[in-house]
Image (cartoon, rainbow, N blue to C red):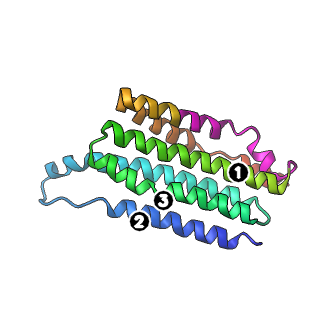
Amino acid sequence: MGKTRLEAFSDGVIAIIITIMVLELRAPHGSEVGVLMPLLPAFLSYVLSFIHIAIYWNNHHHLIHTARHVTGGILWANIHLLFWLSLVPFVTAWMGENHFEQRPVALYGVVMLMSGVAYYILTTTLIRHHGPESTLRAAVGNDFKGIISVVMYAVAIAASFGNRWIGLAIYWAVALMWLIPDPRIEKAHERS
């Protein structure tokens, strides 16, 4: 089966996720700069989530670009990833509306953790289908960055119950780690 429908569907879902997140940002009543201050937690939550979604979209694009074709298992692994990403607008809004309280920050981490696990499953499913000599397998290698991200999310969830700011700092650290472009897949694709 070709991969174009998977790419188009995934792009559409991710676009909707971003749209839902931005629609959660409510304009304040009044025109003074001070009326924006209560919205700062919601805005910072949005920025963090936007960065995470953009990273997933970018990496998903590169991941699927290496695939020659997809199977039913790959489609379900992709749907699994999209399910967890579709919860990002909810946890983003809850975290921002509640000014980064412990439980919303921890639940945000659970969604990020499960998104990371789902991405790992998708990657593994693609590699299994395309074989150990595939371009993707060569590019991913031991996937240290992906595995450390999942570990960091788990640590952040636990830390959130002790100090929510540590949990948030770890979420930002994961995002910043992935903002640095990872050229492995592009280089491996060029070599093949």
Disc marking residue 19? 2
- Cα distance, mark 3 to mark 2? 11 Å
The residue that label 1 is drawn on is 123
Mark 1 residue crowding within 10 angstroms, few (<14) / some (14–19) / many (20+)? many
In which quadrant of the rendered view does residue 4 lie? bottom right
Mark 3 or 1, nearer chain start: 3
Marked residue nearer the N-terminal end (3 or 2): 2
Q: Nearer the viewer, residue 148 or 129?
A: 129
Q: Residue at x 32, y 60 (%)?
A: 24
Horizontally, is 134 left or right of 59 in the view? Answer: right
Give how far across and how far down residue 36 sits, in percent.
20, 51
145 sits left or right of 107 in the view = right
Callout 3 amino acid: Ser
At a point 68% along the width and 35% down the height, the residue shown is: 144
Q: Which mark is residue 136?
A: none
Indicate yes or no whether the magenta region holds residue 155: no
The quadrant of the picture occupied by the C terminus is: bottom right
The secondary element bearing badge 3 is classed as helix
Mark 3 burial class by Cα count in 10 Å: few <14, some 14-19, many 20+: many
Q: Answer yes or no: do the residues labelled 3 and 1 have beta carbons within 8 Å?
A: no
Q: Residue at x 58, y 38 (%)?
A: 150
Q: CA distance from mark 3 to mark 1?
A: 19 Å
Q: Earlier in the sequence, mark 1 or mark 2?
A: 2
Residue 66 position in % (x across, y down): 75, 58
Quadrant in which the N terminus appears: bottom right
Q: Which residue is mark 3?
A: 86
Q: Residue furthest right?
A: 133
Q: Give the foreground label among 3 and 2.
A: 3
Q: Give the magenta part as a residue range.
A: 132-152
**Residue 107 picture location, percent across and down:** 41, 43
